Image (cartoon, rainbow, N blue to C red):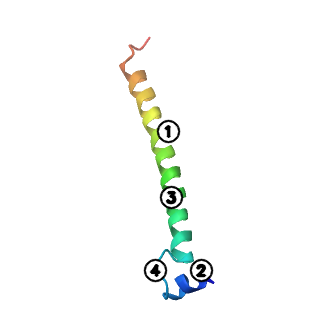
Amino acid sequence: MKKAETDGGDRPGTTSSDAERLAALEREVRELRRANQILKSAASFFAAELDRPSR
């Protein structure tokens, strides 16, 4: 009942749709941060490879 009142705008709080969107955005942020860390690691690896003298 409280959820229905919140979703209907009769009670203050986070609506169900807002909570779902927030959860999805938090998942996306986690995924993007992980991908960013992987890319940083790869960039460091390849930068180190370029600094090594070639044979």
User: Label 1 amino acid?
Assistant: Ile
Where residue 42 sits in the image (x, y, percent)?
A: 47, 33
Q: How many marks?
A: 4
Whichever of callouts 4 and 1 sits on the residue coming sooner in the sequence is 4
Q: Quadrant of the N terminus?
A: bottom right
Q: Are marks 3 and 1 in contact (CB under 8 Å)?
A: no
Residue nearest the viewer, comparing 27 with 3:
3
User: Along the line of sight, which residue is nearer the eye, 34 or 49?
Assistant: 34
Q: Nearer the viewer, mark 4 or mark 1?
A: 4
Q: CA distance from mark 2 to mark 4?
A: 10 Å
The Cα atoms of the two marked residues, 2 and 3, are separated by: 22 Å
Give the labeled residue for mark 4.
12
Q: Residue at x 55, y 64 (%)?
A: 24
Q: Secondary structure at mark 3?
A: helix
Give neighbour class at mark 3: few <14, some 14-19, many 20+ (Cα, 10 Å). few
Q: Position of residue 44 (x, y in %)?
A: 41, 29
1 or 53, nearer to the observer: 1
Q: Which residue is mark 1?
A: 38
Name the element at disc 4. loop
Amino acid bearing label 2: Lys
Q: Nearer the viewer, mark 3 or mark 1?
A: 3
Is 53 placed above or below 44 here? above
Q: CA distance from mark 3 to mark 1?
A: 19 Å
Q: Circle 3 is placed at which residue position?
A: 26
Vertical side of 27 occupied by 33: above or below: above
Question: Which one is earlier in the sequence, the residue at label 2 or at label 3?
Answer: 2
Q: Residues within 10 Å of mark 1 (few under 14, many from 20)?
A: few
Rendering coords of residue 8 (x, y %):
53, 88
State the residue position of label 2.
3
From this view, report whether residue 20 is shown above or below residue 7.
above
Q: Tag 1, which secondary structure?
A: helix
